[in-house]
Image (cartoon, grey):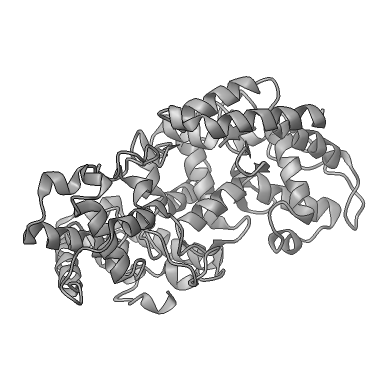
Amino acid sequence: MKKKYASFLLASLLSLSTAPAFSQSASDEIAKYREMIAEGNPAELYEMAGEELWKQSAGPKKATLEKCDLGLGPGVVDGASAQLPRYFKDTDRVQDLESRLMTCMETLQGIAQAEVIGGAFAKGIRKNIEAIVAYVVTHSKDMKINVPATHPKEKEMVALGKKMFFFQGGPMDFSCASCHSVKDQRIRLQDLPDLTTQAGAALGWGAWPAYRVSSGEFWTMQRRLNDCFRQQRLPFPIYGSDVTIALSIFMANKGDGGIVQTPGLKR
Amino acid sequence: MNTLYVRYCTTAVLLTCLSLSAQAQTVDAKFEAMLSSGFRAQGIAGLDRLKQDPIQALCSDPDVRNTPTAQKVLIEEQTKAMAAIKPPSDGKYLGSWKAGEAVAQSGRGATWSDTTKAPNGGGCYNCHQISKQEISYGNIGPSLTGYGKTRGTSEAILTYTWNRINNSKAYNACSNMPRMAHFNLLTEQQIKDVMALLLDPESPVNK
């Protein structure tokens, strides 16, 4: 399986690297690439690893995550990420998939959240979370985004996320809205979804987490947002912080009713 | 970069002046708390970057931005921005278009993964079409292809273009374009080079 992907990816990447000079939009090439590997997104490798990790005893408590409640009851993975972020009574917090996984790992397995928060993407315990994310989000593919944000705490987080979306700062005065509030805009050849509309938000929110061809890695939503903030020239967003969850529920709620296309496949 | 920010007034104070509802103030207080707990400094990207100047604070709120009170403040800010722009120290506006093309191509600089040792780029192609030969351009800003050819190089055009690159907010306080000189993103020489890219008759932009 791995070998098949590797040779296939290499061939596809070579054709990608020569093609853009003749095409008007990088998204044309990406669309072709998506079609080519529609039968097998490399995120599948992460998903398979994630399923094993979900069922494997780990941490000081030597427990699995099979009793983890992602919002639909203990152990329910099907459709779970389509209804996240949401309010959780036990933590009295609105949580996204990754912050919820941290809760489960702490309560069930005894892995301290601080260890995860202080880590780095694609390394150590975070690498495991990324694989588990791939597993969970694959089980919401083609379902409807179901984040109506009816609970008062959810409503409040949507409002805070909206404020963050329009918040300008840093030496370039950028906000999320600088690039994501007008239809059909691009940075270089990269299409930018208009996240202020239902259709745009469904497209943007609905296609992440995704396998990123340019980095050859599976990126969770936390990692996607982290790199947005980096390019916005803001300071470093803390993993699983309310800022990231507020922005996430703002996008998910805006795209409510759209189709989940995770794991996505991105440039 | 850290010392560049002059904090005229805090976001909280500004928005309190402008939004009267108690509910909005609760959201604002929670927002401030969320900001301060949600980020940490990394590399050259310090927490001071979350402190907004009046332009950033007012342009951030689509509901407040177009109110007469906000508009009055924003026009004052434009005037201040215009007054702070320095003309070229030797009186020469145009540098080398070739060097300007390199500045326009580079989108690097000012992120937490950058250092201050390497020069920043202007990132111009991220948002603008410039030379026809470069097909990988963004469309957030207007096309600048043929810029000098269609406008000429009168004193008025030279100063307008200089001012726009130095501080676009001198003309439109909520312009999406970064304030290149105000935040020391580009050096005076780099700005002269970008000027040449746009205005030199020999530049590919004007061919």
Q: Is residue B38 above or below residue A12?
A: below
- Given residues A256 and B193, the one toward you in this image is B193
Q: Quadrant of residue B138?
A: top left
Q: Is residue A227 above or below residue A138?
A: below
At 61% from the left edge and 50% from the top edge, which residue is drawn?
A: A223
Residue A90 percent across, percent down from the top left: 70, 51
The answer to whether one can see residue A255 in this image is no
Q: From the viewer's perspective, tell me whether residue A162 is left or right of residue B18.
A: right
Q: From the viewer's perspective, tell me whether residue B69 is left or right of residue A249.
A: left
At 75% from the left edge and 32% from the top edge, which residue is drawn?
A: A6
Q: Is residue B17 above or below residue A175?
A: below
- Given residues A57 and A37, the one toward you in this image is A37
At 43% from the left edge and 67% from the top edge, which residue is drawn?
A: B119
Residue at the outermost bottom position = B3
- Given residues B42 and A18, the one toward you in this image is A18
Q: Indicate the quadrant containing the N terminus of chain A: top left, top right, bottom left or bottom right.
A: top right
Residue A30 percent across, percent down from the top left: 54, 29
Q: Indicate the quadrant containing the C terminus of chain A: top left, top right, bottom left or bottom right.
A: top right
Q: From the viewer's perspective, tell me whether residue A75 is left or right of residue A92.
A: right
Residue B187 percent across, percent down from the top left: 33, 70
Residue A256 percent across, percent down from the top left: 49, 32
The answer to whether one can see residue B27 in this image is yes
The number of discs equals 0
Q: Is residue A162 above or below residue A120?
A: above
